[in-house]
Amino acid sequence: MDLYDEEQLTRDYFDFLRFRSISADPEYGGEMRACADWVAKYLEESGLQVEQWETPGYPVVAGKWMGAEGKPTLLLYGHYDVQPVDPLDEWESDPFEPTVRGRDVFARGAQDNKGQILYAMAAIRALMKRDGKLPINVKVCIEGEEESKSVGFSKVLEERKEQLQADYLVAPDFDIPAADRPSIVLGLRGLVALTVDLRGSKHDLHSGMAGGIVYNPNHALVEMLAALRNEEGQVVVPGFYDDVEMLSDEERDLLTLDLGDEQLYREEFEAEANGGEADLPPGESARARPTLEINGISGGYSGPGFKTVIPAQAQAKISCRLVPHQDHAKIRDAIVKFLEERCPKGMEMTVTDHGGAGAMRASVKGPLVDALAKAYEEVFGKECVRTLSGGSVPITQQLARVAGAEAVFMGTGLMSDAIHAPNEHFNLDRQRLGFQVFARFLELL
Amino acid sequence: MDLYDEEQLTRDYFDFLRFRSISADPEYGGEMRACADWVAKYLEESGLQVEQWETPGYPVVAGKWMGAEGKPTLLLYGHYDVQPVDPLDEWESDPFEPTVRGRDVFARGAQDNKGQILYAMAAIRALMKRDGKLPINVKVCIEGEEESKSVGFSKVLEERKEQLQADYLVAPDFDIPAADRPSIVLGLRGLVALTVDLRGSKHDLHSGMAGGIVYNPNHALVEMLAALRNEEGQVVVPGFYDDVEMLSDEERDLLTLDLGDEQLYREEFEAEANGGEADLPPGESARARPTLEINGISGGYSGPGFKTVIPAQAQAKISCRLVPHQDHAKIRDAIVKFLEERCPKGMEMTVTDHGGAGAMRASVKGPLVDALAKAYEEVFGKECVRTLSGGSVPITQQLARVAGAEAVFMGTGLMSDAIHAPNEHFNLDRQRLGFQVFARFLELL
């Protein structure tokens, strides 16, 4: 197949990675817009009609090619923003200067999502260049706030409803279980994301003078957070599991949820796979069951040496992953109520809601899933499994609904790519496989 | 009394405050040494014989005047280092540019300890200037790591034993209950200070992929820390209270432990006085009973926005205040054992010991205490109470033992001076009172 040009793709890839497009940090606003311009130019040069949709946050780059009359329309969704990079001192090379070691490219966004969305964009460009047309109609939506709960895009979805209409939606933002084991993701978990702030006094106090008198916000926080789960790893917030639907027998038959993971976790991450619900295999606990995690905790002094302080305030960032049919607002309210009930007298508790969504789960059979599975099987020469993801892309659920599209998720990432972590990387061979699968998928659909 | 020259004292005070002498942060090594030189010069110009004693850390400035043959020797102890200044954005003026608002001087160290040790040094200087001599023999020891557990000074104490010999030891580092209520501190609490680090995986993980599989170090940490105390605010570490000695009837009679504090806490600190043991008045809980506080907690993402991460590591800084006759090493070991027993499988726990000491409590009657009480009563025109402090100055206990001295603590600080916190300040009138008390004390002893 002469479609694939690694030299050109790598040049474009590195240009894309050099933008410090961290949507969570307002400092990088200029780089965000420059990155959006770069994506728009790339799609234009590929032969698509391109617009940038302004939002209350960062712009969405929208492209389309509608020349395949009578054929279905596929909506391709991705994002040009990336996660923050801290702790910076754990990176072995500059997160915004792509560095190749072996066949791996190290950079923030190397996989999530620049490395993956680019192979899909490059496949469209290559088909247009070779054939002057595409086998089906294609719309492209690449937004700038996926890592910040899509605050901008979600606000303009309804007004862009007509432009977004499509038969199918695909988001190349996912992992395969191993480099030679193709897989399609049929479900995502929903999300609740909260910041909880506690304030105990007007300013920091001296632990010798005030210790034994005031209630330390750090103590209040650890007591409130520890109460959220029991010793079996279950969330004890009242109502948390009420609406959880277990897998049907057909889903259990057709889905592969085995992660082969306990050994993988020990070797790859130097971690035990002992954090889930006590009576469930880790693969099911992480994909078909809801979880609650403390993503950040801070309060008082954490610099060098020691400071005998009773801090004025302490903070936790908490998120839940949800499964069908948990309602994200109901779960959020139940957690807030649970924490409020345990907040000591005189301690001020403030909650910031970072948005969220319910879970999403597609049918395990159908033309979209079947075409994508066949593309994977041809390119990899291996059977393609159908599975669920433990992750969340809240915007895709809203987007699929507004677009009227059946949605499925693909990817050639590996769990060891260290997305959201220091030394994120992606492999050039897996980028080529992603390109080939996506190009073949367009032909088969 | 023409001894006191506020204009001159304020000039010297501001020079002293401008040194960024943060012992906990290696970045300020140069400022630390410049500050020691300034103190040495001040004492030399006062007529004392001065040396700087090198230590494994920062130097101790040692001065003496031994011209009062047959008279007792008083050892004056203080420190020229200060606490770190974060959170910097809560300061209303530069912590190292002394700023006067009303009669208050705002700066890091304004009270603890530069503002207080300086009035004692200035009283010595003024007496020498007026009389050409002092009423008793005086030794001065001003060290540079009191806020860093005196790591340097404690190492050289034994080898300086002969030079440190004294009859009495006084440390002007303390509070009075109100601006018109003189008080002498006869006891200090001991200290245990630990940093506990947990590591769960090699690098940060994505909470969508790994949530429900790995054990989140933030969860392990809050569960371990929450287990340390019960709902009555008592520490449940086995053995923690075993050696605690309650106050004797004579101590209860002669000591004033009433803080008048619940109202003070509500108004001054916007905090409830509800953090101590449930069945004890706050004043006794904070001064005559041991405590355990989480001084710092950190793990995962705490920047703007949200990051759905399962952090590789989490950390807590924990300290205890001890009372007679708790052994600090025994308490430290009991806490470490308690935490280790609750550390989940596969989680690596590392403990850093920041040093400590047992508690110290002087006799409630005697020539030293009586002279100091009389000086306070003459200057303030009010009865001087005898009390205990909830704080710790671990080095003073070792110093008193090595010097063979009876020790007592004085001061004109107020709890509202915000020591160890943003906007630390000291009042120029209370600095004058401290000067007058110390000068009169030298005459009466």
Image: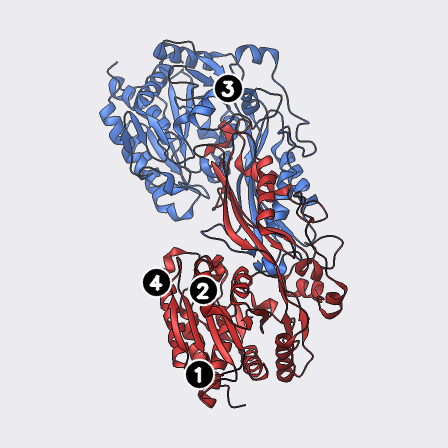
Chain colours: A red, B blue
CA separation, marks 1 and 3?
78 Å
CA separation, marks 2 and 3?
61 Å
Residue A20 position, x and y percent, is 41, 64
Q: Do the dots labelled 2 and 3 sit on one chain?
A: no
- Between circles 1 and 3, the one closer to the viewer is 1
**Is the C-beta separation of discs 2 and 4 under 8 Å?**
no
Could you tell me which chain the residue with mark 3 belongs to?
B
Q: Do the dots labelled 2 and 4 sit on one chain?
A: yes
Res. B65 visible in picture: yes
Give the structural element (helix, strand or loop) at label 1: helix
The residue that label 1 is drawn on is: A8
Badge 4 density bin: few <14, some 14–19, many ≥20, Cα 10 Å: few
The residue that label 2 is drawn on is: A81
CA separation, marks 2 and 4?
12 Å
Question: What amino acid is labelled 1 in the image?
Answer: Gln
Question: What amino acid is labelled 2 in the image?
Answer: Asp
Badge 2 density bin: few <14, some 14–19, many ≥20, Cα 10 Å: many
Badge 3 density bin: few <14, some 14–19, many ≥20, Cα 10 Å: many
Q: Do the dots labelled 4 and 1 sit on one chain?
A: yes
Q: In this view, does B143 lie above or below A252?
A: above
Could you tell me which chain the residue with mark 1 belongs to?
A
- Between circles 3 and 4, the one closer to the viewer is 4
Q: In this view, does B271 lie above or below A411?
A: above
CA separation, marks 4 and 1?
26 Å
The residue that label 4 is drawn on is: A30
- Between A230 and A366, the residue placed more toward the observer is A366
Could you tell me which chain the residue with mark 2 belongs to?
A
- Between circles 1 and 2, the one closer to the viewer is 2
For marks 4 and 1, the one nearer the N-term is 1
Q: Do the dots labelled 1 and 3 sit on one chain?
A: no
Q: Quadrant of the N terminus of chain A?
A: bottom right
Which label number is shown at residue B186?
A: 3
